[in-house]
Image (cartoon, rainbow, N blue to C red):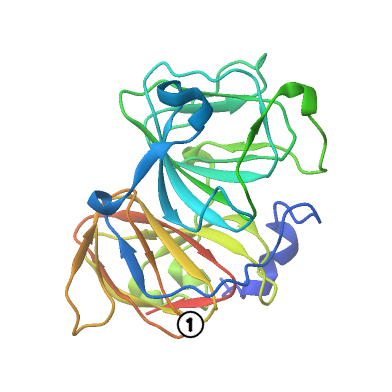
Amino acid sequence: MKKLTLGVFALALTITATAQTPTTDNAKSKNEVVTQDQIDWGWLNPLRGDKSPAAGQLWGDRTKNEPSGFLVKFNKGFSSPPHIHNITYRGVVIKGLLHNEDEKAEKQWLPAGSYWQQPAGEAHITAADGEDNLALLDIQEGPYLVKPMSEAFDNGERPINIDESNLVWLHAKDMEWVSEKSKVETAFLWGSHETNQLRATLLRLPAGFKGSIKNLSPNFRAVVISGKVTHQFSKKDDENVLEPGSYFSAEENASPVLSAATEAVIYIRSNGNFKIK
């Protein structure tokens, strides 16, 4: 099978690209790591207090007009009132079972590794049914606000719910930006692979993986979704053990070193290309 270039998927796998949601991120990332015990937790919707899910910031500030990534914890049995958001967000389930749909829709419980997208202005509820429920939310602009259904609007984007079993994984041998020896697999989630456009992918590292990711973009951010990953800024630096929900970023041309004793999945959001060696 012929290897695929980044541009091949620009049309077929671009999920949304409207004027409403930014398609670039001008903020420059730096070499940074946030482990589970370093996450600062608060309420996702402070107005609801402990009736709200808990939120832990990873990058950016969701209360300001800037891109941001954060974790959200839901108690078992949680179900929100019908509402909208002022901005579009994307989510990946890390633990548990989550449902995000119209209030009249039959429950579609998304397990760990699943992906969903909630457009700005679209009325919906969010519910959780696992004993331990955790998700990553990624926004391209802020602030992240909860609004009543009376303010619903159509921004031209559409909701997406993809069960992890429906993700399409490409093998390393089919991608020229991934070393074939690495045996890493990739699933495209959202964005465009045109030059300098935001995009997000899942990387599946095989058990026993040892390698590096060279960032060729001004903006590169990654969150561990499953498994356990050992991270180093370089081979000379101390190791950081990253469990699900942990975060790392890289400055342009940096090559963080990663290893995984067992299979691991990482969410990568970048404003350009990267290479896996």
Dot 1: element: loop
Residue 240 or residue 228, whichever sits in front:
240
Q: Is residue 212 above or below residue 15?
A: below
Residue 244, percent across and down? 31, 48
**Residue, x 26% and y 82% (percent of image)?**
234
Q: Amino acid at mark 1?
A: Glu
Label 1 packing within 10 angstroms: few (<14), some (14-19), many (20+): some
Task: Quickly name the residue at label 1.
Answer: 252
Residue 223 or residue 85, whichever sits in front:
85
In the image: residue 276, left or right of residue 273? left
Q: Is residue 257 above or below residue 16?
A: below
**Residue, x 42% and y 27% (percent of image)?**
97
Q: Quadrant of residue 265?
A: bottom left
**Residue, x 60% and y 43% (percent of image)?**
144
Q: How many numbered tags mark residues here?
A: 1
Q: For the N terminus, give its image quadrant.
A: bottom right
Q: Quadrant of residue 41?
A: top left
**Residue, x 22% and y 55% (percent of image)?**
262
Residue 121, percent across and down? 75, 35
Can you name the residue that lies furthest to the front here?
Answer: 47
Residue 84, percent across and down? 68, 30
Q: Is residue 199 above or below residue 160?
A: below
Q: Is residue 268 above or below residue 128?
A: below
Q: For the C terminus, give its image quadrant.
A: bottom left
In the image: residue 111, left or right of residue 82? left
